[in-house]
Amino acid sequence: MERTALVTGGTRGIGGEISRALKEAGYLVAANYHNEIAAAEKFHQETGIPIFSWDISNFNSCEKGIADVCETLGGTIDILVNNAGITRDCMLHKMNLEDWTKVLEINLNSVFHMCRSIIPAMRDKKYGRIINISSINGLRGQAGQSNYCAAKAGIIGFTKALALESAPKGITVNAIAPGYIDTAMTVSLHGDLRERIQSEIPVGRFGKIDEIAHAVLFLADERSSFITGTVLNINGGQYL
């Protein structure tokens, strides 16, 4: 049976690699994006993966976007990967309300919006895989990221609660907590800072985006049905 997967923030960085990996594994994939139209169109041209634009921080937009995906691809969503996220780093005593609210809306509220819109159909079908991308900093904290850490920690609590609710219906809900991964964000770090961070990673390097995608494939597999409510830490051995 061909399963349908939807990846938020699925056209760039980690999300783009997750979308590619799912397609290569035989899933029918839809990739969500909001801004960066040119990058999304380039991704579609390169991969053939259908792209859908909506604002995941808006509940009504998520409902409509998911309906568009289901109408276009047929059927319902079997696998949901909540990957999209932003940063607005600032020490708390200088952080403004807009930067706090925006990060919570996109990184955490969106997970509720997406899951609330998709899970009824999963419950009816008695099958589903929900994979939420958290962060090492949602587990251990990070100075200057109180908004980001709060959102990513919230994802973990949400994951565990929804896993308990959904287990009797054949739906697994898990989180992945990446450490420092080689993305545009880490490449842009100042040289000294990048070297310092790398020196703190026991394996001696940054993670690769395909390593996160590989973990998503593992959790999305039908044979991973006894794994739910877990947080898979992919951080090169960093202590939490």
Image (cartoon, rainbow, N blue to C red):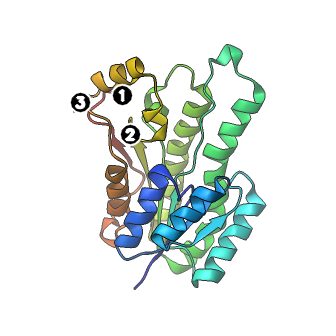
First of labels 1, 3 by sequence position: 3
Q: Determine the residue positioned at 37% across, 77% down.
A: 26
Which of the pair 2/226 is nearer the observer? 2
Q: Nearer the viewer, residue 176 or 163?
A: 176
Q: Mark 2 points at which residue?
A: 181
Closer to the camera, 232 or 54? Answer: 54
Query: For this rendering, which residue is in front, 115 or 91?
Result: 91
Q: Position of residue 229 (x, y in %)?
A: 42, 52
Query: Of callouts 2 and 3, which one flags the residue occurring earlier in the amino acid sequence?
Result: 2
Q: In this view, does 80 lie above or below 28?
A: above
Q: Label 2 to label 3, Cα distance in Å?
A: 12 Å
Q: Is residue 229 left or right of residue 88?
A: left
User: Disc 1 to disc 3, how far (Cα)?
Assistant: 17 Å
Q: Which element type, helix, strand or loop, lies under badge 2?
A: loop
Residue ID for mark 3: 204
The amino acid on which the numbered mark 2 sits, given as a three-letter code, is Ile
Residue at disc 3, secondary structure: loop
* Pointer 2 local density, CA inside 10 Å: few below 14, some 14–19, many at least 20: many
The quadrant in which the N terminus is found is bottom left
**Kind of residue indicated by mark 3:** Gly
Q: Which residue matches tag 1?
A: 240
Q: First in sequence, mark 1 or 2: give its number.
A: 2
